[in-house]
Image (cartoon, rainbow, N blue to C red):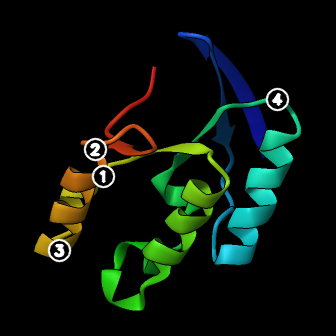
Amino acid sequence: MEIITHHSQDLKTAEIIGDELLIVNPEDTLQLIVDIYYQGFDRIVIHEKNITSDFFDLKTKLAGEILQKFINYKMSLIIVGDFNKYSSDSLKDFIYESNKGNRINFLSSFS
């Protein structure tokens, strides 16, 4: 796992780069938030491939559990990936609603 630091609009962003799954359960999420927070970052960018596929199946309720950790600990999250491959209308609606806010966003790229 590598952390690339981005600075913009008074925000320090940690972009996490790696090939392994970094978020599989709420406990992984909490550990990631704590590690990043103590390094002085304001938000996290993580790529879709680093999150368990169960996250994108809303029936598992894993997305809600994981994203609630980010909200509770006031850490913003950007998930980068190709979300068009998911056929779930519920997931598309969830992404649309999330992108209306500024705490959790789903983007096709981050630069």
Instruction: From the viewer's side, name the closer residue of 85 and 71.
Output: 71
The CA span between labels 1 and 2 is 4 Å
Q: Give the CA distance from mark 1 to mark 3.
A: 12 Å
Q: Are marks 4 and 1 in contact (CB under 8 Å)?
A: no
Q: Which residue is mark 3?
A: 90
Please determine whether, in this image, residue 95 is positioned above or below residue 76.
Answer: below
Does residue 100 appear left or right of residue 93 in this picture?
right
Q: Nearer the viewer, mark 1 or mark 3?
A: 1
User: According to the image, label 4 marks what residue?
Assistant: 40
Which numbered disc, 4 or 3, marks the residue that appears first in the sequence? 4
Numbered label attached to residue 38: none
**Residue name at image x 74 percent, y 75 percent:** 27
Query: In this rendering, would 45 be left or right of 61?
Result: right
Q: Please rate how many residues cluster around mark 3, counting C-alpha atoms within 10 Å: few if below 14, some from 14 to 19, many from 20.
A: some
- Which tag, 2 or 4, sits closer to the chain's start? 4
Q: Position of residue 35 (x, y in %)?
A: 85, 49
Q: Label 2 is placed on what type of residue? A: Asn
Q: Kindly identify the amino acid type of the residue bearing the numbered disc 1.
A: Ser
Secondary-structure class at tag 2: loop
Q: Which mark is residue 98?
A: 1
Earlier-in-chain disc, 1 versus 3: 3
User: Percent position (x, y) of residue 107?
Assistant: 34, 39
Q: Residue at x 24, y 63 (%)?
A: 94
Which of the pair 54/11 is nearer the observer? 11
Residue 88 appears in the picture as rendered: no
Q: Around disc 2, counting alpha carbons within 10 Å, would you say few (fewer than 14), some (14 to 19), or many (20 or more)?
A: some
Element under label 3?
A: helix
- Upstream in sequence: badge 4 or badge 1: 4
| Label 2 sits on residue | 99
Q: Are marks 1 and 2 in contact (CB under 8 Å)?
A: yes
Q: Tell me the amino acid under the disc marked 4.
A: Gly
